[in-house]
Image (tube, grey):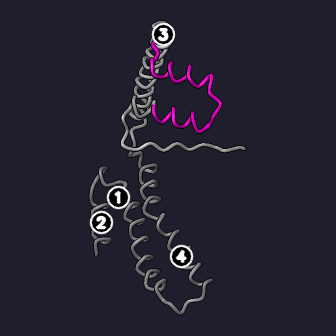
Amino acid sequence: MPYILGRRAARAGPAPADGVPAFIDGAAVLAVSQAVIQPLGHNPNLSPAAQGIINTASTVTLAALPVGLAVAIMRYRLYEIDRIISRTLAYAIVTGLLVGVYAGLVLLATQVLSVTSPVAVAFAARLQDSVDLAAMQADLARVVHRALEPAHISLWTNNRG
């Protein structure tokens, strides 16, 4: 019943309802096919091959609604390509500016101002002289606990003997 009413409304109205028939066709194909396929799929006496065919048919018919929508959009030009292009360009420019500002700030902080962490420098200096893996793990855990104060520390290592 909704299908018939939708088709009549689409034929009766002017331009705003141009894409409705294609969308309703996709919805009708989806609804009817699922109403037929779903009861068949729950039959426990089906062979695996028949079950596979029913599952494949069910999956394929799920594409009916998006395909109907795509047909309606493309056939009746329900998209505004100039708006899509202008927004894409605007977002690309804004994203590029944000990336540039971020990269500039990181470059300024690391190269020009030479910002370094005293914890990282002290830890690196201690590690240069240490070759004992257990001592390095304990030292790393101690430095991380002192700097970040986490609730739990896990250290994964690759023991390549």
Q: Is residue 91 above or below residue 19?
A: above
Segment colored magenta: 115-142
Q: Position of residue 119 (x, y in %)?
A: 45, 22
Foreground pick, 119 / 45: 119
Q: Which residue is mark 1?
A: 20
The residue lying at 45 percent from left, 33 percent from top is 142
Tell me the distance, in whole angstroms, between the alpha carbons under discs 3 and 2: 68 Å
Q: Which residue is mark 3?
A: 114
Q: Which residue is mark 2?
A: 6
Q: SS at mark 3?
A: loop
* Residue 142 placement, left or right of 156: left
Which callout, 2 or 4, points at the residue further toward the start of the chain? Answer: 2
Q: Which mark lies nearer to you, 4 or 1?
A: 4
Q: Is residue 60 magenta?
A: no
Q: Position of residue 33 (x, y in %)?
A: 45, 76
* Residue 121 placement, left or right of 128: left
Q: Amino acid at mark 1?
A: Val
Tell me the distance, in whole angstroms, between the alpha carbons under discs 1 and 3: 62 Å
